[in-house]
Image: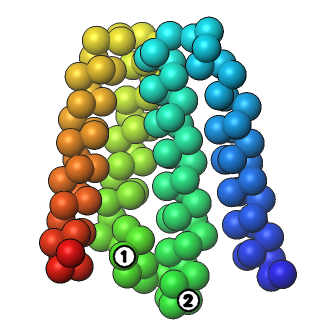
Amino acid sequence: MTAADERLSRALHETVTVLVCSAPLAFDETRLLSAFRMLDAADRLMAIMTDHLETAVDGSGVAGGLGGDGFLARARADFADHRMLAMTDQAAFTDWLSRYVAEFCAQALRRTRAEGV
Protein backbone atom coordinates (compact mmCIF):
# COMPACT_ATOMS: atom_id res chain seq x y z
CA MET A 1 0.00 0.00 0.00
CA THR A 2 1.38 3.39 -0.98
CA ALA A 3 1.59 6.32 1.41
CA ALA A 4 -1.27 8.00 -0.48
CA ASP A 5 -3.38 4.85 -0.11
CA GLU A 6 -2.65 4.78 3.62
CA ARG A 7 -3.70 8.45 3.99
CA LEU A 8 -6.89 7.78 2.06
CA SER A 9 -7.64 4.70 4.14
CA ARG A 10 -7.04 6.61 7.38
CA ALA A 11 -9.25 9.52 6.26
CA LEU A 12 -12.08 7.19 5.23
CA HIS A 13 -11.81 5.21 8.47
CA GLU A 14 -11.98 8.40 10.53
CA THR A 15 -15.09 9.55 8.67
CA VAL A 16 -16.81 6.18 9.00
CA THR A 17 -15.97 6.15 12.72
CA VAL A 18 -17.50 9.62 13.14
CA LEU A 19 -20.66 8.47 11.37
CA VAL A 20 -21.01 5.27 13.39
CA CYS A 21 -20.24 6.91 16.73
CA SER A 22 -22.68 9.74 15.97
CA ALA A 23 -25.59 7.41 15.26
CA PRO A 24 -26.60 6.80 18.91
CA LEU A 25 -26.45 10.53 19.61
CA ALA A 26 -29.32 11.06 17.18
CA PHE A 27 -31.68 9.48 19.72
CA ASP A 28 -31.07 12.22 22.28
CA GLU A 29 -30.09 15.34 20.36
CA THR A 30 -32.22 17.79 18.44
CA ARG A 31 -33.07 17.27 14.79
CA LEU A 32 -30.98 20.33 13.97
CA LEU A 33 -27.88 18.82 15.57
CA SER A 34 -28.50 15.55 13.75
CA ALA A 35 -28.68 17.47 10.47
CA PHE A 36 -25.48 19.29 11.40
CA ARG A 37 -23.71 15.97 12.00
CA MET A 38 -24.73 14.78 8.54
CA LEU A 39 -23.36 17.98 7.01
CA ASP A 40 -20.15 17.62 8.99
CA ALA A 41 -19.75 14.07 7.66
CA ALA A 42 -20.47 15.29 4.12
CA ASP A 43 -17.82 17.98 4.59
CA ARG A 44 -15.34 15.31 5.70
CA LEU A 45 -16.14 13.24 2.60
CA MET A 46 -15.76 16.28 0.35
CA ALA A 47 -12.36 16.89 1.95
CA ILE A 48 -11.35 13.32 1.14
CA MET A 49 -12.54 13.76 -2.43
CA THR A 50 -10.65 17.00 -2.94
CA ASP A 51 -7.54 16.00 -0.97
CA HIS A 52 -7.14 12.40 -2.16
CA LEU A 53 -9.27 11.31 -5.05
CA GLU A 54 -8.98 14.29 -7.36
CA THR A 55 -5.20 14.16 -7.44
CA ALA A 56 -5.27 10.40 -7.93
CA VAL A 57 -7.43 10.55 -11.07
CA ASP A 58 -4.58 11.26 -13.43
CA GLY A 59 -1.74 12.46 -11.23
CA SER A 60 -2.11 16.05 -12.40
CA GLY A 61 -4.77 17.13 -9.96
CA VAL A 62 -7.37 17.27 -12.72
CA ALA A 63 -10.45 15.73 -11.26
CA GLY A 64 -12.67 14.86 -14.15
CA GLY A 65 -16.04 14.09 -12.57
CA LEU A 66 -14.99 14.48 -8.95
CA GLY A 67 -15.41 18.20 -8.64
CA GLY A 68 -12.71 19.60 -10.87
CA ASP A 69 -15.08 22.45 -11.64
CA GLY A 70 -14.51 23.76 -8.11
CA PHE A 71 -17.99 22.86 -6.84
CA LEU A 72 -16.72 20.88 -3.86
CA ALA A 73 -14.27 23.58 -2.84
CA ARG A 74 -17.04 26.18 -2.99
CA ALA A 75 -19.42 23.90 -1.09
CA ARG A 76 -16.87 23.31 1.64
CA ALA A 77 -16.17 27.03 1.95
CA ASP A 78 -19.90 27.73 2.13
CA PHE A 79 -20.33 25.18 4.92
CA ALA A 80 -17.35 26.63 6.79
CA ASP A 81 -18.91 30.08 6.53
CA HIS A 82 -22.29 28.91 7.87
CA ARG A 83 -21.63 25.99 10.21
CA MET A 84 -21.71 28.06 13.39
CA LEU A 85 -25.25 29.21 12.62
CA ALA A 86 -26.40 25.81 13.90
CA MET A 87 -25.40 27.01 17.38
CA THR A 88 -26.01 30.74 17.12
CA ASP A 89 -29.00 31.29 14.80
CA GLN A 90 -30.97 28.15 14.05
CA ALA A 91 -33.50 29.89 11.80
CA ALA A 92 -30.70 31.32 9.65
CA PHE A 93 -29.03 27.88 9.58
CA THR A 94 -32.25 26.26 8.39
CA ASP A 95 -32.68 28.90 5.67
CA TRP A 96 -29.07 28.48 4.56
CA LEU A 97 -29.44 24.69 4.56
CA SER A 98 -32.36 24.89 2.13
CA ARG A 99 -30.22 26.87 -0.30
CA TYR A 100 -27.23 24.52 0.25
CA VAL A 101 -29.34 21.46 -0.57
CA ALA A 102 -30.71 23.20 -3.68
CA GLU A 103 -27.15 23.86 -4.88
CA PHE A 104 -26.26 20.17 -4.55
CA CYS A 105 -29.44 19.16 -6.38
CA ALA A 106 -28.68 21.60 -9.19
CA GLN A 107 -25.12 20.29 -9.40
CA ALA A 108 -26.37 16.70 -9.56
CA LEU A 109 -28.73 17.63 -12.41
CA ARG A 110 -25.92 19.38 -14.32
CA ARG A 111 -23.68 16.33 -13.95
CA THR A 112 -26.44 13.94 -14.94
CA ARG A 113 -27.23 15.97 -18.06
CA ALA A 114 -23.54 16.25 -18.94
CA GLU A 115 -23.24 12.47 -18.69
CA GLY A 116 -26.28 12.00 -20.93
CA VAL A 117 -28.16 10.00 -18.34
Give the x, y percent position of residue 85: 39, 19
Task: Provide the residue designation for mark 2.
Answer: 59
**Tag 2 and tag 1, C-beta contact below 8 Å:** no
* Mark 2 element type: loop
Which color scheme is applied?
Answer: rainbow
* Quadrant where the N terminus is found in the figure: bottom right
At x 28%, y 12%, the residue is 91
State left or right for residue 46 relative to residue 91.
Answer: right
> In the displayed structure, would residue 69 be above or below residue 74?
below
Q: Residue 86 sits in which quadrant?
A: top left
Tell me the quadrant of the picture where the C terminus can be found. Answer: bottom left
Q: Could you tell whether 19 is left or right of 87 in the image?
A: right
Determine whether 34 is above or below 75 in the image: above
Query: Horizontal and vertical percent for residue 59?
Result: 55, 89
User: Mark 1 falls on what kind of element?
Assistant: helix
Amino acid marked by disc 2: Gly
Q: Nearer the viewer, residue 69 or 14?
A: 14
Which residue type does callout 1 highlight?
Gly
The percent position of residue 84, horizontal first and vertical second, equals 45, 22
Q: Looking at the image, is mark 2 or mark 1 nearer the viewer? A: 1
Q: CA distance from mark 2 to mark 1?
A: 14 Å
Q: How many C-alpha atoms fall within 10 Å of the one at disc 1: few (<14), some, or many (≥20)?
A: few
Q: Residue at x 49, y 45 (%)?
A: 42
Q: Position of residue 19 (x, y in %)?
A: 65, 38
Q: Nearer the viewer, residue 110 or 57?
A: 110
Task: Kindly identify which residue carries mark 1.
Answer: 65
Query: Along the line of sight, which residue is nearer the eye, 110 or 71?
Result: 110
